[in-house]
Image (cartoon, helix red, strand yellow):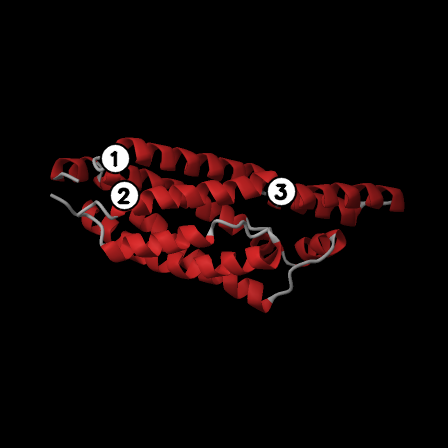
Amino acid sequence: MNSQTAVTYKSLYKAAFISTILMLVIIPTQILVFVLTKIPATTIEWFSLFNENILIGFFHADFFILINNILISIIYLAFYHSLKEINKGVIQIGILLGLIGIAAYISSNKTFELLRLSQEYFSAQTDADKLILEAAGKASLLGWQGTAFDTYYVLNGIALFCISILMFKSSDFSKAAAVWGLLAAFFMIIPSTAGTIGLIFSLLSLIPWYVFSILFAKRFLSFSRTK
């Protein structure tokens, strides 16, 4: 990347650096909440969780992962301008697929639907109304981690492959960063919804992704300081 590009997009690189730091805070916090609190198993348990502790409900409903993905969209733009001189076509394909995946994820998230249904469920006056609301809640939960979620997962894995492969040819990023990125992409081949193996791959992907994020955050900070 030439110095003129770095200067032109200094504000973007700074935003990408800040986004990465926020993401690095959210990920372990999300894991900690999952470890310390029970994930609801039924629709009524979801309603009860939102009724008793909205914040924990937001964590379990992946609201903060949604925030993470919005932050990642900023990071993707920074990757585009960092790697477009290596192979503009490949990075365009990767970023496009990644952004489509993020859009699919945003549309799949049901945090506020579950919150609203929970409020209506506990204010319902009849058992018939509660049954209708429970059915609506079950439908929301089924739609949450369905086609849109799996699409998001796979497309972002492909985006990460494109980014990491181009990193090997770039003097702006280390080969170590490229390797960690490829490892994270590999573990994203199987969506987290694909049973036990999907869950295992999902958890394993967090390790290389975290290291990868630290490494590229350092470079974005460096780019943002270019004069």
**Disc 3 marks which amino acid?**
Gly
**Disc 2 marks which amino acid?**
Leu
The reply to whether callout 3 and callout 2 are in contact (CB within 8 Å) is no
Q: Would you call the spot at circle 3 few (<14 residues within 10 Å), some (14-19), or many (20 or more)? A: few
Sequence-wise first label, 1 or 3? 1
Q: Secondary structure at mark 3?
A: loop
The reply to whether callout 1 and callout 2 are in contact (CB within 8 Å) is yes
Q: Which residue is mark 3?
A: 146
Sequence-wise first label, 3 or 2? 3
| Outermost residue to the right | 127
**Residue 70 in view, yes or no:** no
Which of the image's four quarters has the N terminus?
Answer: top left
| Residue 67 against residue 30 in the figure, above or below | above
Q: Which residue is mark 1?
A: 87
Left or right: 27 in relation to 212:
right
Q: Determine the residue positioned at 22% across, 38% down.
A: 86
Q: Nearer the viewer, residue 185 or 225?
A: 185
Q: Secondary structure at mark 1?
A: loop
Q: Which residue is mark 2?
A: 166
Q: Secondary structure at mark 2?
A: helix
How far apart marks 1 and 3 lie (CA) works out to 33 Å
Query: Is label 3 or label 2 in front?
Result: 2
**Disc 1 marks which amino acid?**
Asn
| Residue 200 against residue 125 in the figure, above or below | below
Q: Determine the residue positioned at 37% across, 45% down.
A: 161
